[in-house]
């Protein structure tokens, strides 16, 4: 149990509430089938593994300000296709656009997400802080039934900073007149959510369903969202 009186709870969205891996996989399966990509890739998982490799590297470059969002959205698919002999920027752009359209319409959440938010809503002020793109994050929340639980959604695009930069945490707290001592960050990413919040001076809840080891100890650590009801 927490002995501290929190009033403002800031949640990450992807991989914390919204089940990114399950939803993304479903969207990619639709795309893989639509474009007959089995002619080029040994199987679906081969395609997905190649995509993840290029996507992670390009996301790192995007977070560092080395490439623009528009480049990221298409290039990750272009490099995936090219690796397997498909040199087509048109197809890469088409798949990139389809993914942005399809993925936020998927609605898988982590177990007990709605139950926990229902419990927390009457006791705390709830917010989202996400590095995701504006054009998909709001759609995700609406389709998955998350929107009613949050007073405000803060995106890195609107804030002008990406987690773990302290600027995004400062922007969010200032926007809702919250003090650090009464605020806490709930997220799954050890660097962007946990270390980012810690460096800014916020307490943290590390959502760690995979039981991954991290060097820095968070304020709280949970494996299931329902455990938030024991903290708050």
Image (tube, grey):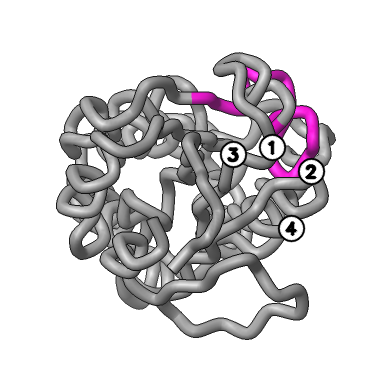
Find residue 195 and name its label: 4
- Please identify, in this view, whether the residue under mark 2 or under mark 4 is nearer the observer: 2
Q: Which residues are magenta?
A: 154-169
Q: Position of residue 215 (x, y in %)?
A: 76, 79
Q: Which residue is mark 2?
A: 200
Observer-nearest of 159 and 127: 127
User: Which element is circle 4 on?
Assistant: helix
Q: Is residue 26 left or right of residue 211?
A: left
Observer-nearest of 76 and 123: 123
Q: Position of residue 111 (x, y in %)?
A: 20, 64
Vertical placement of residue 52 versus 166, above or below: below
- Residue at 28% x, 61% y is 22
Q: Which residue is mark 3?
A: 182
Task: Identify the image quadrant of residue 54.
Answer: bottom right
Q: Is residue 37 left or right of residue 221?
A: left
- Please identify, in this view, whether the residue under mark 4 or under mark 1 is nearer the observer: 1
Q: Classify 10 Å Cα crowding around label 2: few (below 14), some (14-19), many (20 and above).
A: some
- Please identify, in this view, whether the residue under mark 2 or under mark 1 is nearer the observer: 1
Residue 163, magenta (yes or no):
yes
Between the residue at mark 4 and the residue at mark 3, the CA separation in whole angstroms equals: 18 Å
Q: Position of residue 165 (x, y in %)?
A: 79, 38
- Please identify, in this view, whether the residue under mark 2 or under mark 3 is nearer the observer: 3
Mark 2 in CB contact with mark 1 (< 8 angstroms): yes
Q: Which residue is mark 1?
A: 180
Of the two numbered discs 2 and 1 on the same chain, state the one appearing first in sequence.
1
Mark 2 in CB contact with mark 4 (< 8 angstroms): no
- Residue at 44% x, 36% y is 96
Observer-nearest of 10 and 122: 122
């Amino acid at each position: 149990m927490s002995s501290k009186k929190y009033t403002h709870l800031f949640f990450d969205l992807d991989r914390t509430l919204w089940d990114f891996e399950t939803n993304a996989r479903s969207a990619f399966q639709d795309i893989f089938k639509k474009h007959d990509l089995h002619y080029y890739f040994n199987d679906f998982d081969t395609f997905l593994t190649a995509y993840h490799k290029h996507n992670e590297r390009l996301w790192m470059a995007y977070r560092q300000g080395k490439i623009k969002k528009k480049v990221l959205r298409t290039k990750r698919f272009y490099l995936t296709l090219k690796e397997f002999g498909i040199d087509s920027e048109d197809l890469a752009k088409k798949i990139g656009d389809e993914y942005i359209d399809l993925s936020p319409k998927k609605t898988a959440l982590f177990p007990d997400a709605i139950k926990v938010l229902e419990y927390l809503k009457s006791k705390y002020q709830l917010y989202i802080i996400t590095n995701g793109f504006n054009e998909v994050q709001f759609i995700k929340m609406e389709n998955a039934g998350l929107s009613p639980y949050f007073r405000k959604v803060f995106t890195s695009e609107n804030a002008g900073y990406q987690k773990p930069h302290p600027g995004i945490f400062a922007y969010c707290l200032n926007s809702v007149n919250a003090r650090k001592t009464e605020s806490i960050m709930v997220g799954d990413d050890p660097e962007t959510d946990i270390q980012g919040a810690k460096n800014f001076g916020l307490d943290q809840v590390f959502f760690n369903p995979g039981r991954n080891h991290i060097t820095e100890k968070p304020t709280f650590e949970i494996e299931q969202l329902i455990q938030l009801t024991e903290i708050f």
